Image (cartoon, rainbow, N blue to C red):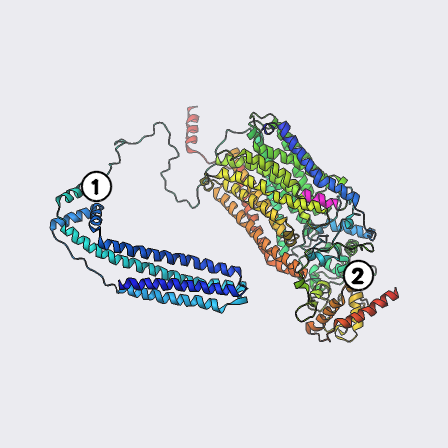
C-alpha cells in the first residue's frame, strides 16, 4: 500500500479521479446540451420590462419556494400542458457579468410551480393585489408580502396604477396603493411565463405515472367523474374566492350573480372561455377557459358547481348543451379574427 | 385428586377456548378484506397468552409428576439429602429437639381458599373471553380497515389483556398452593422421620458440619493489625466527603503537553468564529421557521423570506461548519503527522477571508444581490472567490505539513481532509466558471454542485475528523484500515456521479438521471463500510460512552451518517421522487444530515480539544443540556416535517388543489418551528460552554499557594 504513504501519489491520484468523474457527469454533458438544444420557434424573447422583472424575481429569491419545471409525470399536469424540455430553457444565457445563468428550475414547491402561470393566472390586477398582500386574495397563503414594491399616496396621478386593497389589509395606512415600476415589471415577467407551443406536428412527451384507469374512468352511474368544485378551486377561486363572494372593488361575486343564475348561458360560457371586461368597477377577467383548454365536460361541471354552491339556485346544464354553445362561440371568435 | 382433575379440565377448556378464538379470528380474515395490521395486532396479543398458558400447563404437569414420584420411592434418600442440606439454625433446632425428645404437631390449614380462587379464575376468564368475542363480532368487515376503529380495538384490548393476565397470575398461584399442599404432606412425613432418627453418627456429623458453617475469616489475615499508610504516594484524589450527584460525573479531558500558543490561538479563533456564526445563522433559520406560521411577522425587504433563506443556509455552511472544520483540521492534521503546522500566518489569512466572505455575502443577499437562483451558490463569484483563496491557502498549508511529517504513513484522517479540500476547489471552479452554464446545463452543474458541496466538502472532511477523534477519545486504534480504504475510494466514485438525483424527471439527459439513481444505491458501500469501521472501534468500549461528554456526540454523528445516507439512497428512487420531491421532506433530510452528522461531529471535536488547549472544562451539566436539546430538537424538527411532507406529496399525486396542501402543512410547520427553537436554545448553551472553555476567569485562590507566597515574601 505504497500510495497511501506517499502524499505525492495519493493526492494527485484522488484529485485526478475526481476531475475525471466530474468531466464525465458534468462538463461533457453540459457542453453537449449547449450544442444540441435550440429554443423552440414559438419562444418569445423577454421584453425589456419582462427581463427587468426577471431580475427582481431573482433578487427576491422567489426560486426558494417556486419551481419552474414541469416534470414528465402526471402529477405535474396541473402546472403545464406538456412536460418541459431542454429546448424550453435553451435561450437562457448568463444573466450578467456578476450573475450566473438563471433557469430558476428550483428544488422546492412551498408555493406552486410558475412555468405556465401566465396562462393559469393572467390577471394583472390579481397579481398586483397578491404581491401587495397575498392574504388579501388567498386567505390561507403563507407567501411574504412585497409591500416595498408599492407606494401609498393620497392623490394618485392619472398615470399611476392603483391597486384596490381592502382596508383590513392596509395595515392602518391611509390612501391609495399604487404599483411602482418594479412591481409592474415583476408582474410583466410573471405574466410572460407561458409554455411555448410546439412546432406543428410535434407531439409532446407523454406524462408518466398516469393514474390508473379505475380512478379516472366514469363512476358507476355512467356520468363523467369530473369535480366542478376542484376546477373552481384550481382556476377560479383565487379571484372569486372560496365563498363565491369575490373581492369588493376587484373581483365580482358569483354568489347571487345574475349571469351565473340567469338564462343567458351563451354569455356565461363565453366569459368562462374568453374572459370579460365590461364593468369598470372590477378588474379585467382573462380568457381562463381558453388558456386552460377547458373541455365541454369541465365547463359543464364548473357551471353546475357554481349554480348550486353558496345558495345559488340556477338550472343545471348538460354536457351536450355546453358543447353546442362552445361550438358557436368558437366559430364566432374565429370569424371575428 | 379430585381437585387436580378439576384444574386439569379447567386448563384444557382454557386452551380450547383459546384455539376457538384464534380460529374465529382466522375465519374473519378468510372471508373479508381485513387490514394486515389488525391481523398483526391479534397475533401480538394472542401469541404471548398462548405461550404463557402452555408454560403454565407444562409447569403444572411437571409438578404432578414430582408429586407422584416423591409419594412412592426414594423417600429415604430424599430425607437424608434434606438432612445434609440443613443450615446452621436448623442443625441447632434439630439437636435441641433431639435433646428434648419431644416434638410438636404440625397444624394444617383448610383448603377452601384454593377453591375460591379457582372459581374467581373461571369467572374472570369467561368474562374476559366474552369481551374479546364481543369486540371481534361488533367490528367486522370494512370497519376494521379504519384506523380509528383499529385504535379503539387496541384500547379496548388493554383492559381485557390486563384481566387475562390477572387470571393467569391467579391460576399460577393456585398451582403453587396445590404443590405446597403436597409439600406439607411431605413435611409431615419428614418430621416423623426426624423423630425416629436415633443415631449418634448422624448427630456427630451434623455437629462437625455446624463447626464448618460457623467458621469465618478475621479480615486481617493478610494485613495484620497495623494502620495503612501510602508512603510511596500512589493513591491520590481520595475523597472522604459523601456528596449526592444529581448528574453523572464525566471524565475530564486529559492534559496534553502544551501546544505552541500561536497555533492554539489560531484554532480557538477559528472555533470561536464558527460558534458565533452558528448562533447567528440558526437564529436566522429560527426566524424563517416562524415565518412559515406567521408570514406577516415583518414587511421589510431585507428580512423577507426569499432573501433570508439563502442567508441562513450559507452562514451555517461557510460560517459555522467550514470554519469549525478547518479549525479542527489545524489540530488534527499536524497531530497525526507528528509535526508542526507549516505556516500559521496562512491560517490567519484564510480565517479572515472566510469571515469576510460570510459577512459580505450575507449583506449582498439581504440587499437582493445573488448569483441567479442555484441553491447553495447564491453568493456571487467575487464573494465566493474569497473562499476559494482561503481554501487554496489551507490546502497548501495542510499538504506542506503532511509533506514534513515524521511518521511513515499518512494517517487516514489526512487522506480524507486534504482530499476534501482538493475536491471542493474543483467543485467550486466547476460551479462558477461560465463556459458550461447555458440553458439546462446550468441545472446539470447545479445538481453536481449542491450534492458534491455536501458530500465532498462537509461529509468527506467530517469523516476524516471522525477517523481521528473516535479512536482518540476511545483510546483504541481504528478497527480496520482496509475498510477505510474501501470507503474512501467508493465514496469518491459514487458520490461524484449522483448529483443529478435532485432533478429526476427534469428535462436533463435521461442517462444522467439513471446514473444518479444507480450511484445513489452504490452509496450503500461506503456508508456501510465507514459505519462498520466506527462502530467496531466502539465495540467493547461502549461503557466509555456513558462517562464521556464527547463520545455521545460522535456516536450520534455515526448513527446519523448511516441512517441519513441510506435515507438519501431511498429518496433517489423514481417513486419516492414523485412522493417527496419539491416537498419539505428534502428540508427535513438536509437538516438530519447537516445537523445530525456534521454539526454533532464538530461539537464532539470542539469539546474534545478545546479543554486540552485551554485547560478549562465546560460545565458538564450544560454540555448535557446542549446535547439533549439539540438531539431532541432535531427530531422534533425533522420527523413531523417528514410526515407532513409525505402527506403533502400524496395530496399532490391525487391532484388536490395546491392551497389545500398548504393548509394541511400548517401543523407540521408549527412543530418544525418548535423543534427549531430547541435547537437554537442548544446553540446558545453551546456558545456559553465555549465561552467557559476559553475565556479567562478570575482564578480561584489556592490557599496553600498563597501561604507559601506569604512565607517567601516574609523571608525577603
Is residue A126 covered in magenta?
A: no
| A223 over B653 or under it: above or below | below
Read off the residue under disc 1: B214
The residue furthest top is B716
Give the residue displayed 23% in from the left and 63% down from the top.
Answer: B110
Label 1 SS: helix
Provide the chain ID for the residue under circle 2.
Answer: A
Q: From the image, which quarter does the C terminus of chain B lie in?
A: top left
The crowding category of the residue bearing disc 1, from other C-alpha atoms within 10 Å (few below 14, some 14 to 19, many at least 20), is: few
Read off the residue under disc 2: A155
Q: Nearer the viewer, mark 1 or mark 2?
A: 1
B309 sits to left or right of A336:
left
Label 2 SS: loop
Using the rendered view, name the quadrant where residue B182 is placed.
Answer: bottom left
- Residue B274 percent across, percent down from the top left: 60, 40
Kindly report the distance in space between the C-alpha atoms of the residues bearing marks 1 and 2: 112 Å
The crowding category of the residue bearing disc 2, from other C-alpha atoms within 10 Å (few below 14, some 14 to 19, many at least 20), is: few
Query: What is the magenta range?
Result: B440-449
Q: From the image, which quarter does the N terminus of chain B lie in?
A: bottom left
By secondary structure, the bulk of the magenta-drawn segment is best described as: helix
Amino acid at each position: 500500500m505504497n500510495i497511501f504513504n506517499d502524499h505525492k501519489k495519493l493526492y494527485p491520484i484522488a484529485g485526478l479521479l475526481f476531475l475525471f468523474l466530474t468531466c464525465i457527469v458534468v462538463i461533457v454533458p453540459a457542453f453537449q446540451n449547449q450544442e444540441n438544444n435550440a429554443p423552440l420557434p414559438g419562444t418569445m424573447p423577454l421584453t425589456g420590462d419582462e427581463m427587468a422583472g426577471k431580475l427582481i424575481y431573482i433578487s427576491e429569491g422567489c426560486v426558494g419556494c417556486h419551481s419552474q419545471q414541469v416534470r414528465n409525470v402526471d402529477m405535474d399536469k396541473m402546472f403545464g400542458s406538456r412536460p418541459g424540455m431542454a429546448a424550453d430553457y435553451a435561450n437562457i444565457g448568463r444573466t450578467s457579468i456578476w450573475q450566473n445563468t438563471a433557469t430558476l428550475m428550483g428544488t422546492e414547491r412551498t408555493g406552486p410551480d410558475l412555468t405556465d402561470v401566465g396562462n393559469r393566472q393572467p390577471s394583472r390586477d390579481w397579481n398586483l393585489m397578491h404581491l401587495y398582500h397575498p392574504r388579501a386574495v388567498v386567505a390561507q397563503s403563507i407567501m411574504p408580502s412585497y409591500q416595498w414594491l408599492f407606494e401609498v399616496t393620497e392623490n394618485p396621478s392619472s398615470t399611476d396604477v392603483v391597486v384596490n386593497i381592502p382596508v383590513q389589509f392596509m395595515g392602518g395606512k391611509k390612501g391609495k396603493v399604487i404599483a411602482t415600476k418594479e412591481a409592474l415589471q415583476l408582474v410583466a415577467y410573471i405574466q410572460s411565463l407561458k409554455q411555448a407551443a410546439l412546432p406543428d406536428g410535434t407531439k409532446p412527451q407523454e406524462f408518466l405515472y398516469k393514474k390508473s384507469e379505475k380512478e379516472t374512468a366514469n363512476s358507476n352511474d355512467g356520468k363523467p367523474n369530473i369535480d366542478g368544485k376542484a376546477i373552481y378551486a384550481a382556476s377560479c377561486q383565487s379571484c372569486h374566492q372560496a365563498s363565491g363572494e369575490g373581492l369588493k372593488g376587484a373581483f365580482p361575486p358569483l354568489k347571487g350573480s345574475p349571469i351565473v343564475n340567469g338564462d343567458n348561458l351563451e354569455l356565461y360560457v363565453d366569459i368562462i372561455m374568453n374572459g370579460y371586461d365590461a364593468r369598470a368597477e372590477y378588474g379585467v377577467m382573462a380568457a381562463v377557459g381558453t388558456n386552460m383548454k377547458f373541455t365541454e365536460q369541465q365547463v359543464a361541471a364548473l357551471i353546475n358547481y357554481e349554480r348550486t354552491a353558496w345558495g345559488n339556485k340556477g338550472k343545471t346544464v348538460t354536457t351536450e348543451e355546453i358543447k353546442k354553445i362552445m361550438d358557436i362561440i368558437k366559430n364566432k371568435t374565429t370569424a371575428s379574427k | 385428586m379430585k381437585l387436580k382433575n378439576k384444574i386439569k379440565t379447567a386448563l384444557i377448556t382454557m386452551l380450547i377456548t383459546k384455539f376457538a378464538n384464534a380460529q374465529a379470528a382466522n375465519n374473519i380474515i378468510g372471508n373479508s378484506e381485513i387490514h394486515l395490521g389488525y391481523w398483526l395486532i391479534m397475533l401480538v396479543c394472542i401469541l404471548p397468552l398462548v405461550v404463557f398458558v402452555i408454560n403454565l400447563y407444562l409447569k403444572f404437569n411437571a409438578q404432578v409428576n414430582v408429586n407422584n414420584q416423591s409419594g412412592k420411592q426414594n423417600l429415604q434418600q430424599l430425607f437424608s439429602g434434606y438432612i445434609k442440606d440443613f443450615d446452621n439454625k436448623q442443625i441447632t433446632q434439630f439437636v435441641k429437639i433431639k435433646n428434648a425428645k419431644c416434638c410438636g404437631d404440625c397444624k394444617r390449614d383448610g383448603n377452601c381458599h384454593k377453591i375460591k380462587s379457582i372459581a374467581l379464575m373461571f369467572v374472570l376468564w369467561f368474562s374476559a373471553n366474552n369481551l374479546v368475542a364481543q369486540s371481534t363480532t361488533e367490528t367486522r368487515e370494512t370497519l376494521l380497515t379504519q384506523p380509528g376503529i383499529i385504535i379503539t380495538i387496541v384500547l379496548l384490548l388493554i383492559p381485557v389483556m390486563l384481566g387475562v393476565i390477572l387470571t393467569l397470575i391467579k391460576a399460577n398461584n393456585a398451582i403453587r398452593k396445590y404443590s405446597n399442599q403436597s409439600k406439607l404432606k411431605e413435611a409431615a412425613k419428614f418430621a416423623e422421620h426426624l423423630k425416629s432418627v436415633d443415631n449418634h453418627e448422624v448427630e456427630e456429623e451434623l455437629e462437625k458440619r455446624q463447626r464448618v458453617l460457623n467458621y469465618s475469616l478475621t479480615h486481617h489475615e493478610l494485613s495484620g493489625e497495623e494502620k495503612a499508610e501510602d508512603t510511596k504516594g500512589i493513591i491520590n484524589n481520595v475523597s472522604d466527603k459523601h456528596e449526592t450527584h444529581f448528574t453523572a460525573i464525566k471524565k475530564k479531558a486529559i492534559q496534553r503537553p502544551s501546544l505552541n500558543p500561536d497555533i492554539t490561538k489560531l484554532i480557538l479563533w477559528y472555533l470561536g468564529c464558527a460558534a458565533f456564526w452558528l448562533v447567528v445563522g440558526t437564529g436566522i433559520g429560527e426566524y424563517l421557521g416562524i415565518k412559515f406560521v406567521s408570514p406577516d411577522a415583518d414587511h421589510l425587504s431585507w428580512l423577507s423570506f426569499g432573501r433570508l433563506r439563502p442567508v441562513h443556509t450559507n452562514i451555517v455552511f461557510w460560517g459555522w461548519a467550514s470554519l469549525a472544520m478547518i479549525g479542527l483540521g489545524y489540530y488534527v492534521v499536524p497531530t497525526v503527522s507528528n509535526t508542526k503546522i507549516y505556516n500559521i500566518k496562512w491560517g490567519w489569512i484564510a480565517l479572515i477571508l472566510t469571515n469576510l466572505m460570510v459577512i459580505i455575502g450575507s449583506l449582498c443577499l439581504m440587499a437582493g444581490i445573488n448569483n441567479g437562483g442555484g441553491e447553495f451558490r447564491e453568493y456571487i463569484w467575487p464573494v465566493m472567490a474569497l473562499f476559494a483563496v482561503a481554501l487554496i491557502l489551507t490546502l497548501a498549508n495542510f499538504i506542506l505539513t503532511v509533506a514534513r511529517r515524521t511518521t511513515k504513513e499518512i494517517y487516514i484522517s489526512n487522506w480524507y481532509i486534504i482530499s476534501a479540500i482538493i475536491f471542493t476547489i474543483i467543485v467550486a471552479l466547476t460551479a462558477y466558471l461560465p463556459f458550461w452554464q447555458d440553458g439546462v446545463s446550468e441545472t446539470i452543474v447545479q445538481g453536481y454542485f449542491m450534492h458534491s458541496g455536501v458530500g465532498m466538502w462537509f461529509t468527506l472532511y467530517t469523516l476524516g475528523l471522525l477517523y481521528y477523534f473516535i479512536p482518540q477519545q476511545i483510546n483504541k486504534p481504528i478497527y480496520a484500515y482496509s475498510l477505510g480504504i474501501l470507503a474512501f475510494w467508493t465514496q469518491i466514485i459514487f458520490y461524484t456521479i449522483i448529483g443529478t438525483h435532485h432533478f429526476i424527471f427534469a428535462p436533463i439527459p435521461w442517462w444522467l438521471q439513471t446514473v444518479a439513481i444507480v450511484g445513489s444505491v452504490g452509496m450503500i458501500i461506503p456508508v456501510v463500510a465507514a459505519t462498520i469501521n466506527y462502530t467496531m472501534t466502539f465495540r467493547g468500549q461502549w461503557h466509555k460512552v456513558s462517562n464521556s461528554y464527547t463520545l455521545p456526540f460522535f456516536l450520534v454523528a455515526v448513527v446519523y451518517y448511516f441512517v441519513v445516507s441510506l435515507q438519501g439512497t431511498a429518496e433517489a428512487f423514481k417513486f419516492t421522487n414523485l412522493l417527496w420531491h419539491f416537498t419539505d421532506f428534502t428540508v427535513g433530510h438536509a437538516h438530519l444530515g447537516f445537523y445530525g452528522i456534521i454539526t454533532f461531529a464538530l461539537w464532539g471535536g470542539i469539546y474534545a480539544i478545546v479543554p486540552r488547549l485551554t485547560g478549562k472544562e465546560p460545565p458538564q451539566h450544560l454540555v448535557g443540556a446542549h446535547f439533549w436539546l439539540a438531539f431532541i430538537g432535531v427530531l422534533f424538527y425533522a420527523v413531523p416535517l417528514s410526515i407532513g411532507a409525505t402527506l403533502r406529496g400524496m395530496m399532490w399525486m391525487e391532484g388536490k388543489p395546491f392551497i389545500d396542501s398548504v393548509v394541511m402543512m400548517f401543523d407540521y410547520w408549527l412543530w418544525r418551528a418548535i423543534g427549531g427553537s430547541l435547537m437554537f436554545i442548544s446553540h446558545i448553551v453551546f456558545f456559553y460552554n465555549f465561552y467557559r472553555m476559553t475565556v479567562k476567569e478570575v482564578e480561584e485562590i489556592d490557599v496553600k499557594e498563597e501561604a507559601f507566597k506569604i512565607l517567601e515574601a516574609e523571608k525577603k
